[in-house]
Amino acid sequence: MKQYSTDSRQRMAQNRNRAMKEREKRNILIISAIVLAFIIIGGIIGITQLGKNKKPTEDFSSTAPAVTESTSEAETETQEESTSEADASTTAAVTEAASEKPASEVKTEDYSATMYSTTVTLNVRSEPNANCKILGQVGMDTPIKITGKCDNGWYRVEFNGKTGYCSGKYLSTDKNPTTTKAEPSNTAKTGASPYLVRVNRTQNLVTVYGKDGNGNYTKPVKAMVCSVGLNGKTETGTFTIKAQQGKEERYKWRQLVGGVWGQYAVRFNGSILFHSVPYHTMDKGKLETEEYNKLGQAASAGCVRLAVIDAKWIYDNCPTGTTVEVYDSSAQEPLAKPTPIKIDLNDSRKGWDPTDPDPNNPW
């Protein structure tokens, strides 16, 4: 049997201790590396998820001062209206009732009369309550057959052969005596441009005027449904489509804040432009369909969104020097507001604007 001296045994013990300490150090380093890797991977996943969840906001990159889309449009600009219906297509319902009695508790007595809508667009609902289903809408000064009076201030009406209900706040027995046509202001009677462009924020309607025989912009030639900025973000006033540093500010594609894109963008007031509803990428098949379905109501962070065919018309026909007036009015416009197209979100073609004249458009 092999014998070891005391010194040999001590050296062997010391070697074992050193080996154990080395293994412990290695294990600690390995565990630390694993933990650090998990931390880094977790951070990357968190940042990626944050980027996915963050809504782009509508505005411009590069040279133009940016409009901060506090909404989600941006373009995608897409925050929902804080009110239930705050736009031209549902103007009447913004304050239909601050506190509504449940429809089941409302009592209605027969009442026969003809009344008129006093607002640009009045909702007709299935029950006498602002939270009930909208059956349709009627325009200002439209005669409405009243068949009943509700004890909460609403009226039972006959609508397209059906029974509906309207808030009495937006009905009158007389036509609105103040209703007149919204004529162009005196700020842009004449000019070098063939057209004057007017944007009615209240009605989310763009009306283009041409010149009469005296060179004045009095001939309405085209109406376009649009989406102006939420919460008054589209500034009122008189502006001009201008060139900056000798270069026209119009783009077939324009990148917007948030990495989204718009077609046929034309700048007319600082960072505010006319342009199409935004796209996720510079691809005509990547339309933000939910935003497209908001045409006709306020939805943007300040820009004036249009269907592609209308944005292209302004791009093609309104040169530098064209006056743009932005204003508020419930008065009757000379041309009827076009009915916006609604895209079925289950339709395989939903990524395309149905009005885009591109020959590859599947619509």
Image (tube, rainbow, N blue to C red):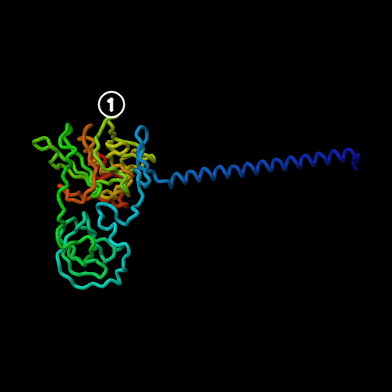
Res. 175 in view? yes
Count of number-bearing discs: 1
Residue farthest left in this picture: 213
Q: Quadrant of the N terminus?
A: top right
Figure quadrant of residue 157: bottom left
At 14% from the left and 55% from the top, the residue drawn is 177
- Where residue 58 sits, quadrant-wise, is top left
Asked if residue 247 lies left or right of residue 212, the reply is right
Examine the rendered structure and indicate whether residue 178 appears above or below residue 356.
below
- Answer few, some or many: residues within 10 Å of disc 1's Cα (few below 14, many 20 plus, some between 14 and 19): few
Which residue is nearer to you in this view: 297 or 310? 297
Residue linked to disc 1: 246
The quarter in which the C terminus is drawn is: top left
At which x and y percent is residue 66? 36, 38
Which residue is more in the foreground, 267 or 168? 168
| Disc 1 element | loop
At which x and y percent is residue 336? 17, 49
Locate residue 9: give its quadrant. top right
Q: Position of residue 262 (x, y in %)?
A: 31, 39
Q: Is residue 309 visible?
A: no
> Which residue is the extreme one toward the top?
246
Q: Is residue 124 left or right of residue 346?
A: left
- Residue drawn 18% across the image and 50% down it: 331
Give the amino acid type for the residue marked by disc 1 in the picture: Gly
Residue shown at 29% from the left, 69% from the top: 103
* On screen, residue 121 above or below 226: below
Camera-nearest residue between 12 and 231: 231
